Image (spheres, grey):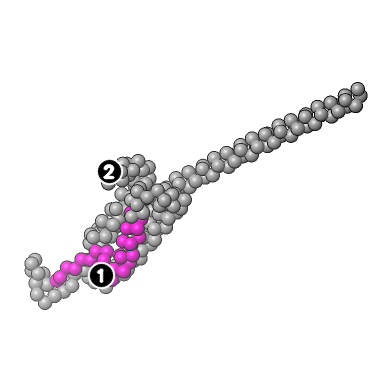
């Protein structure tokens, strides 16, 4: 656990923003996303003949999108923390920086669908509205998407830099081989000339 904490503190600001925003995105799924007031035959504690029903991400007509949203978010969080411990997974993600952008983009798409569903559903009731939980989820997920985008750009820059460095090293290696081959060729030619001159001197004598 200490090792994971140490590695987490060693992450870049973009990676920390991504992780924190994803965690908050998941926590906000337990907040109230939508509420509606139904008329009842018996009064409530306030003396009103209505029943207030609140729905979080896992309840109501958009429960399916809520579960898929949580799945995308939890997958991204799990990959981040597992990559701190597993070098193979970390290498896999470094080579595919678009993966987090895909997960956060899909989760934002599901949030937009949920928002549209509840917006249309609220028109059917006198007292029904989207709650702060859904709004906070959208905000935190937008931050996660932007963080994932900058993470992608950051990793892409590193990949291009590594490829450029490898190409330069290969070019230097090839040049050194060419120089070595050229020097060996010149050496052979010099030895051949010397042998030819020695043969000519022996024939002359």
The answer to which image quadrant residue 112 occupies is: bottom left
Q: Nearer the viewer, residue 91 or 196?
A: 196
Name the residue located 49 percent from the left edge and 46 percent from the top edge.
Answer: 159
> For the residue labelled by badge 2, is the local secondary structure a helix, a strand or a loop?
helix
Name the residue located 37 percent from the left edge and 42 percent from the top edge.
Answer: 12
Name the residue located 17 percent from the left edge and 68 percent from the top edge.
Answer: 52
- Going from N to C along the chain, the mark reached first, 1 or 2, is 2
Q: Is 118 left or right of 147, judged from the image as shown?
A: left
Alpha carbon distance from label 1 to label 2: 40 Å
Does the magenta portion include 64?
A: yes
Q: Position of residue 75 (x, y in %)?
A: 35, 58
Name the residue located 90 percent from the left edge and 27 percent from the top edge.
Answer: 203
Q: Position of residue 136 (x, y in %)?
A: 28, 55
Farthest-out residue, right: 204
Q: Which residues are magenta?
A: 50-77
Q: Is 46 left or right of 73, judged from the image as shown?
A: left
Residue at mark 1 = 60
Residue at mark 2 = 2
> For the residue labelled by badge 1, is the local secondary structure a helix, a strand or a loop?
loop
Between circles 1 and 2, the one closer to the viewer is 2
């Amino acid at each position: 656990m200490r090792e994971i904490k140490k590695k987490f503190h060693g992450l870049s600001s973009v990676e920390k923003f991504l992780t924190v925003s994803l965690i908050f995105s998941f926590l906000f799924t337990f907040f109230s996303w939508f509420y509606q007031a139904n008329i009842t035959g018996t009064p409530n504690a306030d003396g009103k003949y209505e029943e207030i029903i609140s729905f979080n991400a896992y309840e109501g007509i958009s429960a399916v999108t809520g579960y898929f949203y949580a799945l995308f978010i939890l997958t991204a969080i799990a990959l981040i923390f597992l990559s701190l411990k597993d070098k193979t997974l970390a290498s896999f993600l470094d080579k595919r920086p678009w993966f987090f952008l895909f997960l956060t983009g899909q989760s934002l798409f599901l949030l937009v669908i949920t928002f549209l569903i509840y917006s249309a559903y609220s028109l059917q009731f006198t007292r029904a509205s989207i709650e702060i939980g859904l709004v906070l989820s959208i905000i935190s997920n937008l931050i996660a998407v932007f963080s994932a985008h900058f993470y992608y750009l950051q990793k892409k820059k590193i990949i291009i830099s590594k490829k450029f460095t490898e190409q330069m090293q290969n070019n230097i290696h090839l040049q050194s081989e060419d120089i070595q081959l050229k020097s060996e060729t010149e050496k052979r030619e010099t030895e051949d000339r010397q042998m030819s001159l020695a043969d000519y001197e022996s024939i002359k004598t």
